[in-house]
Image (cartoon, rainbow, N blue to C red):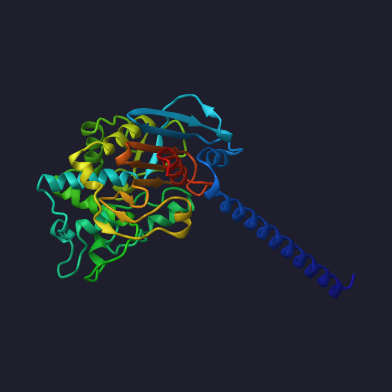
Amino acid sequence: MDKSNEKKKILTIIRIVMVVGLAVFLGISWYLQSQKNKIPDLSFEEALQYTTKNDSDAVITIGIIRDETVFYKVYGENGKELPHEAHVYEIGSLTKTFTAALARQAIQEGKLDIDDTVDKYLDVPAGKDYPTIRELVTHTSGYREHYFEFPMILNHLKGGNDFCGITKDMILKKAGKKQQNKGVYGFTYSNFGYAVLGLVLEKVYGADMTVLLNSFAGDQLSLKNTGISDSTGDLGKYWQWKEGDAYLPAGGFVSDIEDMLSYAGIQLKDDDVFSYCHLPLREIGATPAEYDALGVRMDEIGMSWVIDDRNGIIWHNGGTGHYNCYMGFIPEEDIAVVVLSNLSPNRRIPATVLGAKLLLELSGS
């Protein structure tokens, strides 16, 4: 066979493969976008069925508080109801609401001032502008979501928890290097900021954050199945952490639906610590257009809790590699919703959207 003809045939085949590949990619992209466009019009039940469609691994627990009635149901593949069991879920960034509440308690006890800058409590270089506690809890510190550290490379290659093995010394060193400009920063969600807040709380209480958070959840709030993860549980695929990891205060908790409903009930009560955490500290106007279309708004923020002014909802969510969750409540109507999912936050419709849909349906909004 003539080499030039053979080369032409190979090039033709490559072009055909590329065209077919592009067509498949565009087709999949169009389909996914068309499905996404349907989400705002779906009811909660339809959204739940779509999220669990043909997914045999799905275990989504939905909890509701309404008119002082508390109940939950567990759903699996295709929205089928499963046995009434309190599974162990990672709750990711919902951990921040505990860390912020612990900061509020420290303020009440006179150990902390919300407008103090962190250099008052941490051994960082002098002569720099550092964020305040208020800025840390409201994600307006100017800190990024996180900063690169070398352990993240291996963590990423292993497909695990990016924050595993990030030490407190790494966070302290990075915080000391970051030069903040005086002035007001906008809202930038920051796990790093909550890692720094954890260092501050350790300093004022003289104890490790794992001990502090476990004691706060278990002893003070009587949430016996809520605390820092030991990477075990009945649903599997839990993130790995190392003892004393710096990012634990930002996302290291696991819990179950019974505890989370109790925690939601605490939010609905006139509690000195949590009621203050719900008060707006900053206007953030951070609602993306796609969130707004789905009924999820980010108008203001308190001590970690996000405030939806339009619908009167106070909420927070969380996500890890294989889990995502949502807690939202309307204090004026005494309604709360908890969604715990063992699916990735990127899997179809996340818990945040499911929870917001259900909460709005229950409130009649």
Picture quadrant where residue 185 is located: bottom left
Q: Residue furthest left?
A: 110
**Which residue in the rendered view is the most extreme toward the top?**
83
Q: Is residue 225 above or below residue 161?
A: above
Asked if residue 105 shows in the view, the reply is yes
| Residue 206 in view of the camera | no
Residue 271, horizontal then vertical, whole percent: 20, 38
Quarter of image, res 68: top left
Between 59 and 270, the residue placed more toward the observer is 270
Residue sitting at the far front: 364
Q: Is residue 350 above or below residue 133?
A: above
Quadrant of res 334? top left
Q: Position of residue 299 (x, y in %)?
A: 34, 56
Which residue is at a point 14% across and 48% down the rendered structure image?
107
- What is the number of callouts on the image? 0
Provide residue 314's location: percent of width, then percent of height. Answer: 33, 46
For the residue pair 111 and 62, the one nearer the viewer reads as 62
Q: Is residue 6 above or below residue 104?
A: below
Position of 317 compared to 106: left or right?
A: right
Residue at far bottom of view: 4
| Residue appearing at x 61%, y 38% in the figure | 54
Q: Please state, as top left, top right, bottom left or bottom right, where the N terminus lies in the image.
A: bottom right
Tell me where residue 232 appears, x and y as whole percent: 40, 34
